[in-house]
Amino acid sequence: MLARRNLPSKCSFGHLESKLASVDSTVMRFVIGSFAVCLALIALAGCGPIIWQRLTVNQPITKDQVTFIQEGATRLSEVARELGSPDEILNLKNRLVARYHFIDTKYFRINFGWGLRFFIPYYTPDLVLSGGGAGTDVFDVACDSNLVVQETAFAFHKSSSRFLFPWD
Amino acid sequence: MRCVRSLLLLALLAILTGGCAFVRGTYGEEIKPLDLSSIKKGTTTRAEVATFLGAPERIVEVNDHEIFQYYHFDMKSGLLLFFSRTNVISEDVFVFFNKNGIVEDIVVGKKKPPLEMQFWPFGE
């Protein structure tokens, strides 16, 4: 009885209770929201159901970078000093061709069956949609037998490297 | 509240770093300028080049030139969550010999800037 008498009025006690309840619901909402974000991140992590991948080999060579080359005068070693060494040297009838490659590969994959592992742990079918493309830019330097540049040529195919859906 | 937040932050960090990988790989020995300085055009023989640099990965014959090709590849790959990017760069060395097996020319590129470790697959 004494304790009850020392308590604040019934009205203020009710106010405190509702305040506590609102703090509880805020915390719960925060915890549930964060948990949902964590679950989504787990689902998407590493070997998850969706991935964008890209592979590049070397750096692209632009037309501005090769303006120093003078056909009939510049030597292959000078070209290599500026652009780096070529990736391969090809043998033609009475000359050689030094080739520079820039390769760009893009790949996209989504597995719609990934979430089924939570319901069918022993056998999870894959429902995969994936697609990609690879493109190669080539810069050719044709030289005579004295390794002096005779001709140069570009081939651009980099735009064929895209993230694709199978039906695109 | 603060404890819950800290725990969730820790869990988030663990999840983010759990789905990540950073990989580095090389193929072939890197030939340093010092190794090449001992090769003189017009005097060094094929056998001496093989002694200085080791056996070449590839030998090509082009218009009476014999060419020793030394491969060197450097690779860096990053994976974070659902994004992955792999960058490869090649820095080969070519040594050209004349008909008599004497070094005629050396084709070597200037040192390229170090590869970037990236995971973002979009853009350039």
Image (cartoon, coloured by chain):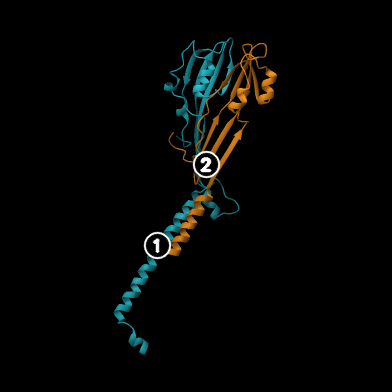
Instruction: Give the farthest residue toward the bottom.
Output: A1
Q: Indicate left or right for B70 with A166 as reference.
A: right
**Which amino acid type corresponds to the residue marked 2 in the rendered image?**
Gly
> Can you identify the residue that label 1 sits on?
A29
The answer to whether any part of residue B55 appears in the image is no
The answer to whether any part of residue A7 appears in the image is yes
Q: Which chain is orange?
A: B
Please tell me whether mark 2 sits on a helix, a strand or a loop: strand
Q: Chain of mark 2?
A: B
Q: Position of residue A49 (x, y in %)?
A: 51, 46
Q: Which mark is residue B78?
A: 2
Q: State whether discs 2 and 1 lie on one chain.
A: no
**Which amino acid type corresponds to the residue marked 1 in the rendered image?**
Arg
Q: Is residue A132 above or below residue A125?
A: above
Given residues A58 and A67, the one toward you in this image is A67
- Label 1 packing within 10 angstroms: few (<14), some (14-19), many (20+): few
Based on the displayed image, in which of its 4 quarters is residue B122 positioned?
top left
The colour chain A appears in is cyan
Q: Is residue A168 above or below residue B46?
A: below
Q: Residue at x 47, y 31 (%)?
A: A161
Q: Which mark is residue A144?
A: none
